Amino acid sequence: MVLASRLSAVEGVIGARAYASLASPLYADSPYPASVRQQVTPMTTDTPALRRLIGYARPHRRQVWKATAASILNKVFDLAPPLLIGVSVDIVVAQEDSFLAGLGVSSVLAQLWVLAAVTFVIWGLESLFEYLHGVWWRNLAQRLEHELRMDAYGHTQTLEMAYFEQQHTGELMAVLNDDVNQLERFLDHGANDLIQLATTTLVIGAVFFVVAPQVAWLAFLPMPLIMWGSFRFQKRIAPRYAEVRRRAGLINSRLANNLGGIATIKSFTAEPIETTRIATASDAYREANRSAIRLSSAFSPLIRMAIVVGFTATLVLGGYLVTEGDLDVGPYTVLVFLTQRLLWPLTRLGETVDLYHRAMASTTRILDVLDTEATIVDGPAALHQAKGDVSLANVSFAYDPLAPALNDLSFSVAAGETVGITGSTGSGKTTVIKLLLRFYDVDSGTVSIDGIDVSELKLEDLRRAIGLVSQDVYLFDGSISDNISYGRPGASRDDVVAAAAIAEAHQFIQELPQGYDTIVGERGQRLSGGQRQRVSLARAVLKDPPILVLDEATSSVDNETEAAIQRSLERLAVGRTTIIIAHRLSTIRNADRIYVLEDGRLVETGSHDELSDRGGVYANLWSVQTGAATTST
């Protein structure tokens, strides 16, 4: 639950970036050093996910070698019991002429005691290395899981707003959580299984060719068929698991969307409709899995039939050699048991390969996120202490080339000035703020602060200079105090209270059960709209930016809250640049200057009184909002 809550913060990336630079610093603090990230080359058909994953494991090569050594030694000692059985048969049959007798232990009883002691040591060592490889592989899996998730999440924070507006939040969460967990499952067991399978083949092959070279080739007879089948299986199963992961992302996206909009679903009694949609997505996921399961389930039975050939051949030919006196009973016993130990683990190869392909499908999705290049990056210039001059010069911008949002827009805001921006819906008001914060880059023209083009500024400096209070307030699931101090971590409680008082939030916070320690819930849902807005304003106050931006901050609050926000603004505006975007003209009535936009163009400029007397667009809007204008029916 905690992890899911933290990942849901992706939904609040717009608000979060307004209070602190969540771009390059987060990625710079990634647990992977820059040298490792450079080693991980972009995904191509010639660079499979496994090679990329190995690149991520390089910083932990010591841990990998330790875990690998433990896996090998565990399997070596695990293969010893068949040898011990062969020695015991040899002692009972040959007695004083046994293998141990040749080493100087003549008494049969002494030989048995020596065998018992060796057995005890081998089983103890086998158990020890089983424990060690389990601990080391699983800890390595946890570490890589954590680091890969943080690297992927850190990288998403470097991406521009267009990326998030084009992605489904639920699908991105599926990559950062479910896909990373799928990789962990393979590292927990699959890597160890593959290493131990290779160890088994090498050790038993060596024993076979030493003990009975004339029989050894029979035990390995099925191996080429098994390897060929594995590669054929790999080619056919990989695209099926890619589809499984894609379907998992889609259903996760649908679930996240529905849970976020549960109030709307309930208010429109749309529960049956949404249940049907989830059922459709879930059924598509089930069908994708069914296709993969049908193929993966056929692998082990086919392998078993190939294994029977090798085991039967060893059993028959080896037995015949014993009856002919060409092979002793003890070595024959070892061969029979070792053939089973050689071939039987291959039945698990299907399960291991299944895990591997699930993991690689997930890894590919994770690496696709990491391969997404940021188009908005740091500029070279620093902005240590902004004065607050803001200027737009001949700015044009379009989200869609066929529908420009801004057309050759120019205006300026002097340091310490309070300006209002208004206009009808879709006139480009909010787009101005997105360009100022550099959530997007302009198509032409310049947006500058203190005479410096924002594209030349470091993103962290730019966004720290601006405090944003938006209409869609995003509060994180934590205490009120944590949310107010979000833009200034480590702020004292006195500073938090002072900011809340300026935003006229202190009184209602004191009346809450836990005061400033009250948990607001996901997206602040335990507070009213007006309370959330005032907490958001207090957050901007505590940040103390030289430029304060209010984007429709009063559009969805009651008159009392609007009045409180206006009183707060009068105190906040002193000594700082304030830009207020509003439909409610009462919010910007006292601004030093008001800019009126229509279709992305500046159509009017002036004070409230000047614009009201001019009889233009602003005057018409003011008449409608004050009731001075009437409409005919």
Image (tube, helix red, strand yellow):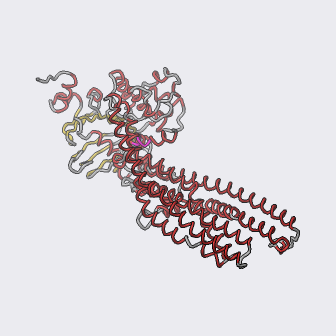
The residue drawn where x is 46% and y is 21% is: 507
Per the picture, the main secondary structure of the magenta-coloured stretch is helix
138 left or right of 474 in image: right
The quarter of the displayed image where residue 114 is located: bottom right
Q: Position of residue 497 (x, y in %)?
A: 50, 27
The residue stretch that appears in magenta: 9-13
Q: Position of residue 262 (x, y in %)?
A: 38, 32
The residue drawn where x is 46% and y is 63% is: 234
> In the figure, 476 relative to 214: above or below?
above
Q: Judge by depth and name the residue closer to the eye, 181 or 273.
A: 273
> In the figure, 393 relative to 344: above or below?
above
- Residue 219 visible in image: yes
Q: How many labels does the image show?
A: 0
> In the figure, 492 relative to 334: above or below?
above
Q: Position of residue 421 (x, y in %)?
A: 27, 36
Q: Does the magenta stretch include residue 526?
A: no
586 left or right of 474 in image: left
288 left or right of 147 in image: left
- Residue 199 visible in image: no
Q: Position of residue 596 (x, y in %)?
A: 22, 36
Q: Of all residues shown, which one is farthest toward the front?
A: 323
Q: Judge by depth and name the residue closer to the eye, 192 or 93.
A: 93
Q: Of all residues shown, which one is farthest toward the left?
A: 632
Quadrant in the picture for the C terminus: top left
The quarter of the displayed image where residue 131 is located: bottom right
Q: Judge by depth and name the residue closer to the eye, 256 or 533.
A: 256
The residue drawn where x is 47% and y is 31% is: 521
